[in-house]
Image (cartoon, rainbow, N blue to C red):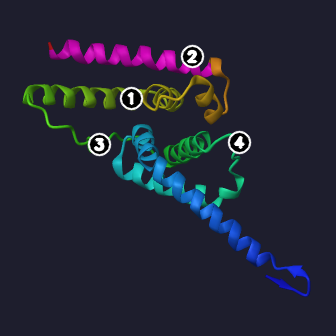
Amino acid sequence: METQGIALPVTVYHVERSDELDAFERIMAQCERRVLRVALRLLNNPQDAQDAAQEVFLRLYKHMGRLDAERGYEPWVFRVTVNVCRDMLRARVRVVALEETPEPAAPQPDAHRGMERAEQREMVRRALSRLGEKERTALVLRDVEGLSTREVAQILGTAEVTVRSQICSARLKLREFTGRMLRRHT
């Protein structure tokens, strides 16, 4: 739409915002569950994870214009997720591990196996909650979400060697903790 030969910036803005809204909706549809899952593992509290996920998508929507299409959106989404979770952890006066709502399990023909899996998930949840923030974040992004070491380093703004060190340390601590838990139950 033109007035006296000059394009109205409002029209261009609406077209751009419409494209951004479409892109945002696609990103949200594709990443919503993963963002919530990462937040839950980093914060160890279902309500905090939901609050974090909402904040993540608010920030993403607000800053859609900053998305670099060539780099892809996943590293950006995870970076925002990690930053929101870090902000929430810093805001806590103390870290309190609350019950986590487990993901619904597939029907098990053997109830005993279902109980074992629930116990294993609880043990992993407790072990993750004992890790430091940096180790837990690196481990969740690498081992749980399946991102490459390079991607994790980019998201965390650190060197790949640092990420490898954090993951190695986290895995050793998890192994020690789960070993102690298993010895107590036998």
Closer to viewer: mark 4 or mark 2: 4
Q: Is residue 15 left or right of residue 52?
A: right
Tell me which segment is drawn in magenta. 162-185
Residue 183 shows in this picture: yes
> Separation of disc 1 and disc 3 at Cα?
12 Å
Mark 1, secondary structure of its residue: helix
Residue 3 in the image: state x and y as whole percent: 86, 87
Say which residue label 4 marks: 70
- As shown in the figure, which amino acid type bears the numbered disc 2? Ser
| Mark 1 vs 3, N-terminal side | 3
Mark 4, secondary structure of its residue: loop
Give the quadrant of residue 45: top left
Residue at 80 percent of width and 75 percent of height:
9
Binning the other alpha carbons within 10 Å of mark 1 as few (below 14), some (14 to 19) or many (20 upward) gives many
Mark 2, secondary structure of its residue: helix
On the rendered image, what quadrant is the C terminus found in? top left
- As shown in the figure, which amino acid type bears the numbered disc 3? Glu
| Mark 4 vs 2, N-terminal side | 4
Say which residue label 3 marks: 100
Which numbered tag is attached to residue 136? Answer: none
> Separation of disc 4 and disc 2 at Cα?
29 Å
Which numbered tag is attached to residue 128? Answer: 1
